[in-house]
Image (tube, rainbow, N blue to C red):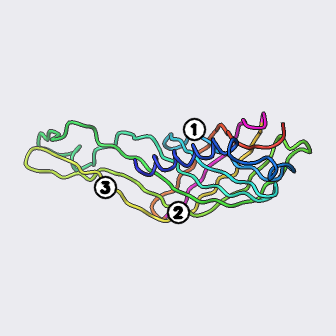
Amino acid sequence: MKTLLLFILVSLFALTSQAQWSYKFLSKEKHFVYSSGDFVMGKQNGGGISVNYIYNNKLTVNIGYSATVKTSADLPAEILKSTENLVPAFSTDPFSNSENIRILVGRVINVNREGTVRLLLQGGPGIYTTREPSFTVKSNTYDYQTEATKSISLVLQPKIEMPLFATLGLSAGPMVIFNESEHYFGAGIGLMYGILGKN
């Protein structure tokens, strides 16, 4: 929760950046800073927020956070196939989900001369956290504890960005996360807000 709060504050900073930054720096329309929020569909649905910076209309840096929605976890086979009449000792359903904090760098390719459609080829490292229940059986009841594991991940997130206005736009693209425990494949669509490009 603290991580999500931190990224929301950073995103709010990016949202107010248009009022704080001087357009003298941006007069040649080469440097852009904006925040984005994405809805991601995949093995598990989720979402993400990020702060983006484009330098000289060629290089991009993305600092982001994404998480999957909590989904009910399946009971292990030892409980399902138990000959005893086991009853749950918990009042809430066991769940699993994941979070990822990442820093991506990449290249910006303008698809058209007007600069209203651009392709971002970006990737980089991240810290991937998974939360899974660990079940224990005691006499005729079973219980669980949620255990979190962290691992270093490689994140690839190419995007097509379409600034509709100088401060508002849409984005879409796949997201792939590789780490030692699992691989996540998803595709997302998002909203961008900030200093995006031409009017």
Asked if disc 2 and disc 3 are in contact, CB closer than 8 Å, the reply is no
Q: Which corner quadrant of the image does residue 17 belong to?
A: top right
Residue in the picture at 56% in, 58% down:
102
Relative side of 72 to 52, left or right: left
The picture places residue 193, in percent across and down from the top left corner, at: 67, 39
Q: What residue did someone put label 2 on?
A: 153
The answer to if 170 sits in the magenta stretch is: yes
Amino acid type, mark 1:
Phe
The picture places residue 161, in percent across and down from the top left corner, at: 74, 43
- Distance from Cα at disc 1 to Cα at disc 2: 20 Å
Reply above or below: 160 against 181.
above
The picture places residue 59, in percent across and down from the top left corner, at: 76, 59
Relative side of 30 to 5, left or right: right
- Seen from the viewer's position, the closer of residues 96 and 60 is 60
Residue in the picture at 22% in, 49% down:
144
Amino acid type, mark 3:
Glu
Amino acid type, mark 2:
Ser
The picture places residue 93, in percent across and down from the top left corner, at: 28, 38
The label number, if any, that marks residue 147 in the structure image = 3
Magenta-tinted stretch: 164-179
Residue in the picture at 74% in, 52% down:
120
Q: Secondary structure at mark 3?
A: strand
